[in-house]
Image (tube, coloured by chain):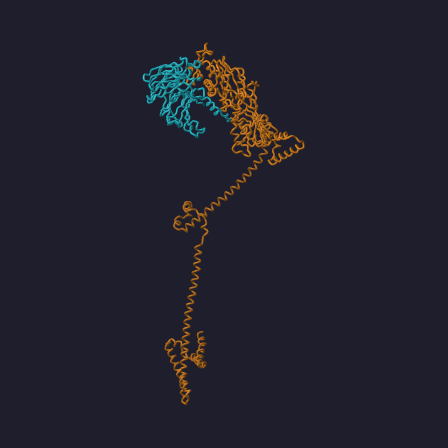
């Protein structure tokens, strides 16, 4: 290449000088080819500066010769041609020098270029290498970062903590000596252990699954077995019926009763269940039965929507019929009232037998629209009772269960929601209907599990078994005590009306042997009449004379002295004592407002009644109180101080033994009887 | 007077019993605390109730302020008389006198500081103590009651120093005549006796019922109440309420009240008296006419 470029360049250089080109070139070529003459080597030897000087000198010589030639030519002459020839030969020599110099210059240039080129090529090569290396470096760096960011899946596994691992893993896995120092080995060991554990657990899981399958199968088998048992048991029951009758064990009867019980409304059902349970568990004298028509009950029992429809239907029917008949408003209202107060066709009968063969029959009804229970009571005795006049109210169905619990008079409906229903049909109070429907006592509602809270009236009240169970025992006991106390009073009244105070032998010790004052009269008194009496105002003011109590008047006489006693008998006798108010007519009228001793006598029977209760259950209280009044009257009359100004002996000589006649600033008489010494002293 | 309407509350056994107890309760004695803020009252069941006078008399008194602050069972029998020293409340009833500390009395479960029983002669029945009288000069207490004697007890040592005998029936009331230290006692036997405390002997006897102007045989002869103003004495009970001049032992004025009087006291120039059976407290001047009556 370099020779070609020099060949190309040479002609240009020569042409620019204007010298004959091809001939010289040919000669230089042959010169070059013929001789093994290296001008390249010569170049290295010559100094470029001297060559440049030579060039400048040659050019100058040429210019001079040309100028001389010019001069000679212009002068003309003969020898000019020889000189011109000479000069021309010299200039040809100079031209040859120039050509050589040119060649040298070219060679030098070529060499220079070649060298540059070489160097450049080397530089390029290095540059390329550098680029390659840089590229590789970059690539490696990327790889390194990739490697560093690499997260092995093993880091996502939650391994057990180090301490646990060393504790639990078997030594061939944990290899403590190796792993302690080397975290890589440690992690490996931990992963190993993890794998172990997982394999074991997977095993266990499989075992458990198979167990479960087995057990499920067993359950299936047993279920089949049990379901096949039912028809067998039924057939046994059928077969055992004749045996039951033979042995007087009426299981079937009980069963039938339970069947009927299913049709009872919920409060009656609660009552039935609880009463039966109580009877079986605690009290053999209690018997429960269901009365009424089951078919009617079934006819009533429909889902709530239907029954509402029924009601509206029946209302519609009623309206239609009333339109047709055109009855009075009263009749329409009457029908509505009857509808409102309708009873459920089934009722529960509970019979309580008492020790003396008397029976308390209780019939419980459920008023469907009012959601309350009522009860009707009847007492039957073993022998027929002749009712004394004053005992009329004692056992009457209306009042025998009145105020079983204080304040529970059973004349008002316990369900506050009923008032609104009553307003719609014009019923003022349930009191007018209790004789027919039974009394809605609060304890009856409780036995049926119905609770009507006063503070937050609830929309629907449902029957609650636990409420019933918690009240059952107390109520039954109270009922029995009530019947027995009323029967006891019944007997006592018969005797009192004849003027005899029946004191039993075990209460005789409370009184002295000789009692002169006598009971003359014992009658009932109406509540209004009691309120009108002038000596009962204190009791009325203290709120102890309500309209649920029974009132009586007793008259005790001795000689000219007449003692009237007004008695308030609380339905809760005998736990609540009868209250006496006295009025003595003897030498003037003395009552508790004008004579402290009369007040003391009242206190002796009213406040100190506990000593007069007698043996349990305390039915002797009233008779003992009356007897004590007789004794007190005796003491009063006999200890009255003799008035010196009046002549004559005392009407009542002192026969009672008294330590002192008067005591204390109020000068009380000795009313307290001491047994067995038999003397009277002060409290 | 309006009576409150009867309350229609369902009454259980406990409420009925409480109501009956209250109907038959009699308050026999009362005493004001030394600070003047509390009133102690004793009743026939042996209970003492402490009322807060400052609360009950204040302008914002409610129903609860009129109920006792504390009530406790003090004696087995009725509490017939009470008197207050500057630190103690002394109560007496059924034969013993007990002392209660006023500072402790409002706390629950208060126990008596001490109890003493005068030496009685009879053992069959324990006689009651009807009257207590403090003699400040001697720092002693005089008790009188059912055993017809006056017993003197020294308040510091608690010993019974004297027993003054003379009454033939039990003693109702006592009064102190300050100038010459003398005690007057009135009893069931109808006599008012004056006792000299220094000689421990009976100085004078006035048998009220023997005087025709004041005796009322149909009521009996018992003397229920006594008050003295050193020269004068008022007494009443079975006989009519009479003002006596002590030196001459003559009745000077007879007050025209029918009912037997239970309490009487001198107040400045007036005589205040109350009967147990009426609702009035009558105020008389010394001249014998009724000035006015305070009525319940």
Q: Is residue A600 visible?
A: yes
Say which residue appears at 52% left-offset and 15% top-offset. Answer: A520
Say which residue appears at 49% left-offset and 44% top-offset. Answer: A205
* Chain (orange): A
Q: Is residue A37 left or right of residue A559?
A: left
Can you tell which quarter of the image residue B118 is in? top left
- The percent position of residue A175, horizontal first and vertical second, equals 40, 48
**Most extreme residue toward the bottom, as rendered?**
A78
Can you tell which quarter of the image residue B279 is in? top left
**Most extreme residue toward the left, as rendered?**
B198
| Number of marks present in the image shown | 0
- The percent position of residue B257, horizontal first and vertical second, equals 43, 17
Question: Compared to A180, does A76 lie above or below?
Answer: below
Q: Compare residues A113 and B236 and report the one nearer the observer.
A: B236
Q: Is residue B76 visible?
A: no
Q: Is residue A144 left or right of residue A366?
A: left
Q: Compare residues A367 and B86 and report the one nearer the observer.
A: B86
* Chain (cyan): B
- The percent position of residue B245, horizontal first and vertical second, equals 37, 16
Q: Compare residues A679 and A99 and report the one nearer the observer.
A: A679
- The percent position of residue B200, horizontal first and vertical second, equals 33, 16
Split into 4 quadrants, where in the image is the C terminus of chain B?
A: top left
**Most extreme residue toward the top, as rendered?**
A648
Can you tell which quarter of the image residue A319 is in? top right
């Amino acid at each position: 290449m370099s020779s070609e470029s020099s060949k190309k360049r040479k002609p240009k250089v020569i042409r620019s000088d204007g010298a004959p080109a091809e001939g010289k070139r040919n000669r230089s070529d042959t010169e070059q080819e013929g001789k093994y003459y290296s001008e390249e080597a010569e170049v290295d030897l010559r100094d470029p500066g001297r060559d440049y000087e030579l060039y400048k000198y040659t050019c100058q010589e040429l210019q001079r010769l040309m100028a001389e030639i010019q001069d000679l030519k212009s002068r003309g002459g003969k020898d000019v041609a020889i000189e011109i020839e000479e000069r021309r030969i010299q200039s040809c020599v100079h031209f040859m020098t120039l050509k050589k110099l040119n060649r040298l210059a070219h060679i030098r240039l070529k060499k220079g270029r070649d060298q540059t080129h070489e160097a450049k090529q080397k530089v390029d090569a290095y540059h390329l290498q550098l680029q390659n290396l840089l590229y590789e470096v970059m690539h490696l760096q990327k790889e390194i970062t990739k490697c560093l960011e690499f997260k092995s899946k093993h880091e996502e596994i939650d391994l057990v903590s180090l301490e646990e691992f060393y504790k639990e893993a078997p030594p061939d896995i944990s290899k403590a000596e190796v792993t302690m120092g080397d975290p890589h080995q440690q992690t490996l060991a931990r992963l190993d252990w993890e794998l172990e554990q997982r394999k074991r657990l997977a095993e266990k899981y499989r075992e458990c699954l198979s167990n479960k399958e087995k057990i499920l199968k067993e359950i299936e088998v047993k279920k089949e077995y049990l379901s096949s048992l039912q028809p067998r048991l039924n057939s046994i029951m059928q077969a055992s019926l004749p045996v039951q009758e033979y042995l007087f064990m009426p299981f079937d009867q009980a069963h039938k009763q339970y069947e009927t019980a299913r049709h009872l409304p919920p409060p009656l059902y609660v009552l039935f269940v609880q009463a039966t349970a109580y009877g079986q568990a605690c009290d053999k004298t209690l018997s429960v039965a269901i009365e009424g028509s089951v078919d009617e009950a079934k006819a009533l029992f429909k889902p709530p929507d239907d029954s509402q429809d029924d009601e509206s239907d029946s209302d519609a029917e009623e309206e239609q019929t009333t339109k047709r008949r055109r009855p009075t408003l009263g009749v329409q209202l009457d029908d509505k009232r009857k509808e409102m107060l309708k009873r459920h066709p089934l009722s529960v009968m509970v019979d309580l037998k008492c020790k003396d063969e008397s029976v308390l029959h209780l019939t419980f009804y459920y008023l469907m629209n009012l959601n309350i229970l009522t009860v009707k009571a009847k007492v039957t005795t073993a022998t027929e009772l002749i009712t004394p006049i004053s005992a009329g109210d004692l056992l009457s169905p209306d009042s025998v269960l009145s105020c079983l619990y204080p304040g529970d008079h059973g004349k008002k409906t316990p369900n506050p929601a009923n008032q609104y229903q009553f307003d719609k049909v014009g019923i003022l109070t349930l009191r007018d209907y209790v004789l027919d429907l039974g009394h809605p006592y609060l304890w009856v509602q409780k036995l049926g599990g119905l609770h009507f809270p006063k503070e937050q009236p609830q929309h629907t009240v449902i029957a609650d078994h636990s409420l019933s169970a918690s009240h059952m025992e107390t109520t039954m006991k109270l009922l029995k005590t009530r019947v027995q106390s009323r029967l006891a009073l019944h007997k006592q009244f018969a005797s009192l009306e004849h003027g005899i105070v029946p004191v039993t032998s075990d209460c005789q010790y409370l009184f002295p042997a000789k009692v002169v004052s006598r009971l003359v009269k014992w009658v009932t008194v109406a509540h209004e009449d009691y309120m009108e009496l002038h000596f009962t105002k204190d009791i009325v003011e203290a709120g102890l004379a309500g309209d649920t109590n029974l009132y009586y008047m007793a008259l005790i006489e001795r000689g000219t002295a007449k003692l009237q006693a007004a008695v308030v008998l609380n339905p809760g006798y005998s736990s609540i004592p009868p209250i006496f108010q006295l009025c003595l007519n003897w030498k003037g009228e003395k009552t508790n407002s004008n004579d402290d001793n009369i007040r003391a006598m009242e206190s002796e029977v009213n406040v100190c009644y506990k000593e007069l209760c007698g043996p349990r259950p305390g039915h002797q209280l009233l008779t003992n109180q009356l007897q004590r009044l007789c004794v007190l009257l005796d003491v009063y009359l006999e200890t009255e101080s003799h008035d010196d100004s009046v002549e004559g002996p005392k009407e009542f000589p002192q026969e009672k033994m008294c330590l002192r006649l008067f005591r204390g600033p109020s000068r009380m008489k000795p009313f307290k009887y001491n047994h067995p010494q038999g003397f009277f002293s002060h409290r | 007077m309006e009576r409150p309407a009867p309350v229609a509350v369902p009454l259980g056994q406990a409420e009925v019993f409480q109501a009956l107890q209250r109907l038959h309760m009699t308050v026999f004695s009362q005493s004001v605390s030394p600070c003047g803020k509390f009133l102690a009252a004793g009743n026939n069941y042996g209970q003492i109730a402490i009322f807060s006078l400052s609360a009950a008399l204040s302008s914002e008194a409610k129903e609860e302020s009129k109920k006792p602050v504390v009530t406790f069972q003090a004696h087995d029998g009725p509490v017939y008389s009470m008197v207050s020293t500057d630190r103690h409340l002394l109560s007496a009833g059924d034969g013993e006198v007990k002392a209660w500390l006023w500072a402790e009395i409002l706390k629950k479960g208060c126990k008596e500081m001490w109890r003493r029983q005068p030496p009685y002669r009879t053992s069959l029945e324990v006689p009651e103590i009807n009257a207590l009288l403090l003699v400040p000069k001697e720092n002693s207490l005089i008790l009188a009651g059912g055993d017809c004697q006056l017993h003197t007890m020294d308040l510091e040592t608690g010993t019974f120093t004297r027993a003054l005998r003379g009454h033939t029936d039990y003693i109702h009331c006592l009064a102190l005549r300050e100038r010459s230290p003398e005690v007057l006692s009135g009893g069931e036997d109808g006599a008012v006796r004056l006792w000299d405390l220094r000689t421990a002997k009976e100085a004078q006897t006035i048998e009220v019922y023997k005087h025709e102007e004041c005796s009322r045989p149909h009521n009996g002869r018992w003397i229920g109440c006594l008050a003295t103003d050193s020269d004068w004495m008022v007494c009443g009970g079975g006989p009519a309420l009479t003002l006596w001049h002590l030196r001459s032992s003559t009745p000077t004025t007879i007050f025209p009240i029918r009912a037997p009087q239970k309490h009487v006291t001198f107040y400045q120039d007036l005589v205040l008296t109350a009967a147990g059976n009426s609702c009035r407290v009558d105020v008389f001047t010394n001249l014998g006419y009724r000035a006015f009556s305070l009525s319940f």
